[in-house]
Structure formats: structure tokens, C-alpha cells
Amino acid sequence: MIEVHNLTFGYSATEDGQILKGVDFAAKTGKLTALIGTNGAGKSTLLKTIMGILKGKGEISVNGKPVSQYSTKDFSSTVSYLSQD
């Protein structure tokens, strides 16, 4: 399961630059999870933040373990990300 709590990310330090603001959700193991939204809503930013490509603030855990405790190799074998591009 992937759990996200109070995730915040912005491309600038100002409040107006915040793309993700206090995002909370859980994606359960073995279940299909779809992320749907309009262009520019932050879908790709959210996934890139979960994958560690972008550094946000908040808590992200996989199977109850914070992502910061995973090695790059272990994390990439546990979670995958397929972009639309």
C-alpha cells in the first residue's frame, strides 16, 4: 500500500507556487488506482514526488515503511511509475 499524508510541493517558495497542498490518499496493494484530473492539476507532479524525483514535504510510505528508509534499488523494485509520455 502507498500512503501519502499532508504532501506539499511547489516549484517556488511562495504560496501561489504550491502545486500540491496537503494531499492525503492511500492506494491499496492489488487494487487499481487511477489518478484523474485536468491538465496542470498536479497529477504528474504528485507521482514524481512519490517516486522521489521531486522533493516535497509530508509523509510518504510504502507497505508501512517511509520511503526515506528504502534504498534506491529496493524502492524501484517495490514501486513503479509509468508516465503518459
Image: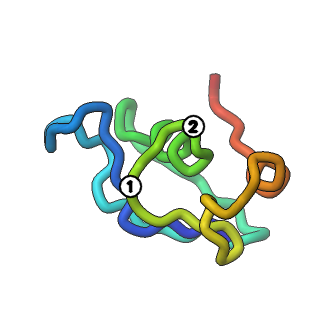
Q: Residue at x 36, y 65 (%)?
A: 6
Residue in the foreground of this view, choosing between 65 and 6: 65
Is the residue marked by circle 2 packed among few (<14), some (14-19), or many (20+) residues within 10 Å?
few
Residue under label 1 = 57
Quadrant into which the N terminus falls = bottom right
Horizontal side of 75 relative to 5 (left or right) equals: right
Q: Identify the residue shown where x is 21% and y is 37%.
A: 13
Secondary structure of the residue carrying numbered label 1: strand
Q: Position of residue 57 (x, y in %)?
A: 38, 55
Residue 20 at x, y percent in the picture: 33, 48
Marks 2 and 1, Cα distance to the nearest angstrom? Answer: 13 Å
Q: Which mark is residue 43?
A: none
> So how many labels did they put on this image?
2
Badge 1 density bin: few <14, some 14–19, many ≥20, Cα 10 Å: some
Marks 2 and 1 in Cβ contact (< 8 Å)? no
Q: Amino acid at mark 1?
A: Lys
- Left or right, 64 with respect to 9, comes to right
**Picture residue at 63% right of the left edge, 60% below the top:** 67
Q: Residue 32 appears in which quarter of the rendering?
A: bottom right
Evaluate whether residue 27 shows in this view. Answer: no
In the depicted view, which residue is nearer to us: 25 or 16?
A: 16
Q: Is residue 30 left or right of residue 58?
A: right
Question: Along the horizontal axis of the image, is 73 left or right of 13?
Answer: right
Pick whichever, 2 or 30, lies toward us.
2
Q: Residue at x 71, y 37 (%)?
A: 82
Q: Which residue is mark 2?
A: 53
Query: In x, y percent, where is residue 26?
Result: 55, 70
Q: Amino acid at mark 2?
A: Ile
Secondary element at tag 2: loop
Q: Is residue 8 visible?
A: yes
Based on the displayed image, in which of its 4 quarters is residue 78 positioned?
bottom right
Locate residue 37, reporting x and y percent: 42, 44
